[in-house]
Each structure stands twice: as structure tokens, then as C-alpha cells.
């Protein structure tokens, strides 16, 4: 058995920096979201995609793909959100085998209330901490990483649900965050895009 290629100092700083900042920023923004709107990050992301969809509805397949979740994980999340009256679950009229998630009036109102506080929190905990050059560099780095992992997933075929939805033990759904909106005020779907 060959020895692993251990991380050098720069590699270790990069890796631990990603892990620690992801957790710290997600937790800080998650706390803000809970206080201001009683809405978790996961709930916020689902509502954003539905709000921007035609007719404020998406099939489970399309919504799971947009969120990069398994349909099983999405189904559990929609069930929890249904109990809060934020979304409804419907079958498609022309294809009863396909399920659609639809934003409710209450869900839309909560999203409208939560969005300004969400943007302020993202700015306070991440965007305003960095200068414009740092933000541009970080955006490029994440694009490279996202493209790499999407290509790897495509090359390997459909991964198992447990693999695609792995969440570190120290993070809950409520701690997961979506990326920040751009400074020009991106549409709501872009706020949650690229998760």
C-alpha cells in the first residue's frame, strides 16, 4: 500500500480555510435567518426556485436537479414544508406519475419578507468582508470547483443518493447556505443557484 500524498502547508491552509469558513458563514447566516424569518437555508432555497419558476411550480425531478439533491431528500424536505403551509405537492394533470412542488401564497409572502434580511446577512458575513478583487478571485475558484465536480458526476453516471447528498455530520439542513447574490441584485433564482 502506498502512502497517501499528505497535504503541504499551503494545501492544508486552503482545505481547512474552505471547511472552516463554510461552516462559520453558514452557521452565522443560518442564525440570522432563524431569527428574522423562522426559515432555514434549505427552506429558503426551495422557495427561491419555486418563486422564479413558471407558475411557481417545478417537478420534483427539475427541483432536485436545480438544488443538486436526490429526489428522496427533496421529498422529505417538501413534506416538512407542506406541514408549515409553504408549499404544496401535486401530481401533473397529464402524467400522474410525476409530482410537482408548488409555492403557496404563505410561502411566497414569507420569502418576500425573508429576502432582504437574507441579502443583508450574506453581505455582513461574507461579501462586505472581502474587497472586489478578492470576491472576483473567490468566484472564479468556486466556478472551477463546481465545474470539476459536475463533470466528474457526469463522467461517473448517476451517483447513489447517499453519495450525492452527503452532509458533514456537524452541519444540518438548517446550516446549509446558498451563494450570495451579486451586487446588482440578482433574480431570486440566482440567489440560490450553484449550490
Image (cartoon, rainbow, N blue to C red):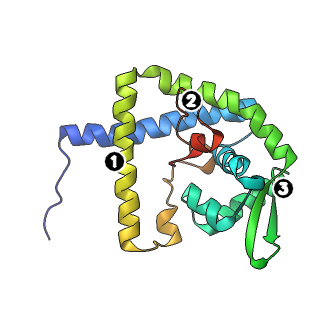
The residue located at (41%, 59%) in the rendering is: 150
Q: Position of residue 189 (x, y in %)?
A: 62, 45
- Give the answer, above or below, for where 68 lies relative to 125: below
- In the image, residue 58 sits, relative to residue 9, either above or below, namely below
Which one is earlier in the sequence, the residue at label 2 or at label 3? 3
Q: Which residue is mark 3?
A: 83
Distance from label 3 to label 1 (Cα)?
38 Å
Residue at image coords 40%, 28%: 135
138, 17: nearer the viewer: 138
How crowded pointer 3 is (Cα within 10 Å; few <14, some 14-19, many 20+) is rated as few
The circle on residue 122 is 2
Q: Are marks 3 and 1 in contact (CB under 8 Å)?
A: no
Marks 1 & 2, CB-CB < 8 Å contact = no
Mark in front: 1 vs 2: 1
* Distance Cα–Cα, label 2 vs label 3: 28 Å
Q: Which residue is mark 1?
A: 144
Q: Secondary structure at mark 2?
A: helix
Query: Of the residues tagged 2 and 3, which is closer to the observer?
Result: 2
Q: Position of residue 19 (x, y in %)?
A: 40, 42
Q: Give the mark nearer the N terminus: 1 vs 2.
A: 2
Nearest the viewer among 163 and 98 is 98
Amino acid at each position: 500500500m502506498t502512502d497517501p500524498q499528505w497535504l503541504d502547508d499551503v494545501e492544508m491552509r486552503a482545505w481547512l480555510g474552505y471547511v472552516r469558513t463554510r461552516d462559520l458563514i453558514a452557521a452565522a447566516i443560518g442564525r440570522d435567518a432563524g431569527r428574522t424569518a423562522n426559515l432555514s437555508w434549505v427552506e429558503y432555497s426551495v422557495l427561491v426556485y419555486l418563486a422564479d419558476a413558471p407558475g411557481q411550480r417545478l417537478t420534483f425531478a427539475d427541483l432536485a436537479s436545480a438544488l443538486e439533491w436526490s429526489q428522496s431528500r427533496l421529498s422529505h424536505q417538501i413534506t416538512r414544508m407542506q406541514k408549515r403551509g409553504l408549499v404544496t405537492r401535486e401530481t401533473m394533470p397529464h402524467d400522474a406519475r410525476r409530482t410537482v412542488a408548488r409555492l403557496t401564497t404563505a410561502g411566497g409572502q414569507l420569502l418576500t419578507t425573508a429576502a432582504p434580511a437574507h441579502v443583508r446577512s450574506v453581505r455582513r458575513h461574507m461579501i462586505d468582508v472581502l474587497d472586489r478583487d478578492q470576491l472576483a478571485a473567490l468566484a472564479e475558484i468556486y466556478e472551477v470547483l463546481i465545474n470539476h465536480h459536475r463533470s466528474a458526476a457526469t463522467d461517473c453516471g448517476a451517483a447513489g443518493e447517499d453519495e450525492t447528498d452527503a452532509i458533514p455530520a456537524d452541519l444540518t439542513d438548517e446550516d446549509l447556505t446558498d451563494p450570495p447574490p451579486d451586487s446588482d441584485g440578482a433574480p431570486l433564482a440566482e440567489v440560490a443557484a450553484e449550490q
